[in-house]
């Protein structure tokens, strides 16, 4: 049985491992794979090239954590949080270490060269989701859970909960809301167990995007323990 460890931050050296885990995490979900008409290996390659720049983006407010399989060192889970600007000096152990301007330029060149085009049919797939997200935005400062993914070979082993609990602890310490868009009922069940509440939901028929099934999303919030 594998054992897992939460690592408090990520670095640009994690690019390949993060790309592999993140792109594979939802590959079995039609609402995810409908974005591309190319194989997973090609998507992982492009994501690897883009990852260092993405990790360095908005370093002042973005926080990144990963979970590794301790027996192999493989990255098997990842969470990205976005702090309010008012709390940019907080949770610094989850901030990606900065790099030289020369490295940033090199990473940006690779980012721009990567093929990240998605199918034009799906460009509007999140329009209504984002409309709901903005409609229910908390009135006070909030941390956004911007991405959470677990490699499918390591599902149902508490990795997602481990990553979310870390953010919940920070939110409680800072006295801010946690706010997010969730995809899939199983994910919602996990979040509600950790104290999130449903504000809204949406079901979209994916046939208009060339896929069978429903794209189901929820807007969730967790109120701060300290206000």
Image: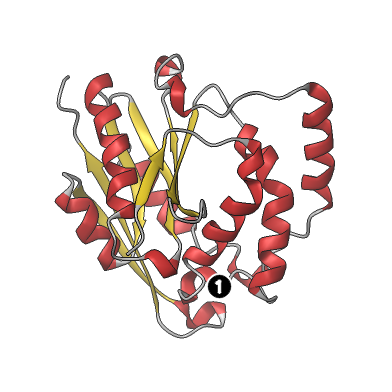
Q: Quadrant of residue 156?
A: bottom left
What SS does tag 1 mark?
A: helix
Say left or right for 197 vs 120: left
> Residue 208, percent across and down?
52, 79
Residue drawn at x 25%, y 54% is: 200
Quarter holding the N terminus?
A: bottom left
Given residues 208 and 14, the one toward you in this image is 14
* Mark 1 nearby-residue class (10 Å; few <14, some 14–19, many ≥20): some
Query: What is the total number of numbered labels drawn onto the structure image?
Result: 1
Say left or right for 28 vs 216: right
Residue drawn at x 59%, y 53% is: 17
Given residues 62 and 199, the one toward you in this image is 62
> Residue 106, percent across and down?
84, 36
Q: Is residue 31 visible?
A: yes
When the figure is inspected, residue 21 is found, relative to residue 61, above or below; the finding is: below
Q: Quadrant of residue 83?
A: top left
Say left or right for 123 vs 25: right
Q: Is residue 138 visible?
A: no
Given residues 96 and 195, the one toward you in this image is 96
Residue carrying label 1: 33
> Residue 133, percent across and down?
37, 46
When the figure is inspected, residue 191 is found, relative to residue 32, above or below; the finding is: above
Quarter holding the C terminus?
A: top left
When the figure is inspected, residue 43 is found, relative to residue 173, above or below; the finding is: below
Residue drawn at x 26%, y 35% is: 168
Query: Which of the colour schemes (rainbow, by chain, secondary structure, one colour) is used?
Result: secondary structure
> Residue 176, percent across and down?
27, 25
């Amino acid at each position: 049985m594998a054992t897992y460890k939460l690592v408090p931050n990520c670095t640009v050296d994690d690019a390949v491992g993060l790309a592999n885990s993140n792109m594979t995490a939802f590959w079995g979900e039609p609402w995810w794979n409908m974005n591309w008409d190319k194989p997973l290996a090609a998507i992982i390659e492009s994501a690897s090239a883009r990852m260092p720049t993405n990790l360095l983006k908005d370093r002042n407010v973005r926080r990144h954590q990963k979970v590794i399989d301790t027996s192999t060192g493989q990255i098997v889970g990842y969470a990205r949080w976005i702090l309010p600007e008012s709390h940019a000096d907080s949770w610094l152990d989850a901030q990606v270490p900065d790099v030289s301007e020369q490295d940033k330029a090199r990473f940006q060149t690779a980012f721009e060269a990567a093929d990240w085009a998605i199918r034009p049919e799906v460009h509007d797939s999140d329009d209504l989701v984002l409309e709901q997200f903005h409609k229910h935005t908390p009135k006070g400062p909030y941390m956004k859970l911007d991405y959470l993914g677990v490699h499918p070979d390591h599902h149902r082993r508490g990795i997602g909960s481990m990553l979310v609990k870390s953010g919940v602890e920070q939110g409680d310490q800072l006295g801010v809301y946690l706010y997010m868009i969730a995809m899939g009922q199983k994910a919602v069940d996990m979040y509600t167990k950790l104290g999130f509440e449903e504000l809204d939901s949406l079901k979209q028929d994916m046939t208009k995007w060339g896929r069978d099934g429903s794209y189901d999303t929820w807007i969730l919030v967790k109120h701060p323990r300290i206000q």
